[in-house]
Image (spheres, helix red, strand yellow):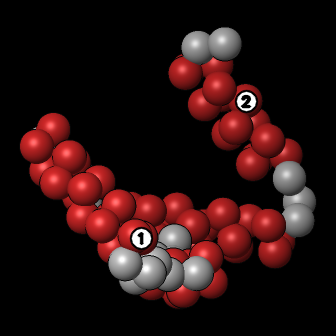
Amino acid sequence: MTVLERKVRFVKAILNDTDEERFVELERTYQRLMKREPCVYTIEELNQRAKRVEQDYMLGKSASQEEMRKRHAI
């Protein structure tokens, strides 16, 4: 399935859906996604971040899934 076909299927599903709550949630999600800046890193930056995360994990400086959700809410 091509990207265009997927887009058409998604738009049709939204247009045919009559659930107001689902539409409001989709609209909020879309607005949050549009406000975010694209995340672009070089290979070197990605490697540095990976090493730092591994070191933090080994030192016990990791965060729980709930903490990550709060920090990086979509």
Q: Secondary structure at mark 1?
A: helix
In the picture of the structure, the residue carrying the numbered disc 2 is 9
Q: Please report the residue visible at 86 percent of the width from the left and 53 percent of the height from the top.
A: 17
Q: Please report the residue visible at 88 percent of the width from the left and 65 percent of the height from the top.
A: 19
In this rendering, is residue 42 above or below 54?
above
Give the class, few, some or many, for how many residues have Cα within 10 Å of label 1's Cα (few <14, many ≥20): few
Q: Which residue type carries mark 1?
A: Tyr
Q: Which residue type carries mark 2?
A: Arg
Q: Is residue 12 visible?
A: yes
**Sequence-first disc among 2 and 1:** 2
Q: Give residue 7's position: percent from left, percent from top.
A: 60, 31
Q: Give residue 46's position: percent from left, percent from top.
A: 21, 48
In the picture of the structure, the residue carrying the numbered disc 1 is 57
Q: Residue furthest top?
A: 1
Question: In the drawing, what numbered circle is on residue 30?
Answer: none
Give the class, few, some or many, for how many residues have Cα within 10 Å of label 2's Cα (few <14, many ≥20): few
In this rendering, is residue 42 above or below 25?
above
Which of label 2 and label 1 is nearer to you? 1
Q: Please report the residue visible at 81 percent of the width from the left and 74 percent of the height from the top.
A: 21
Q: Nearer the viewer, residue 68 or 63?
A: 63
The quarter holding residue 3 reads top right
Number of labelled discs?
2
Q: Nearer the viewer, residue 67 or 74?
A: 67
Label 2 to label 1: alpha-carbon separation: 42 Å
Q: Is residue 40 visible?
A: no
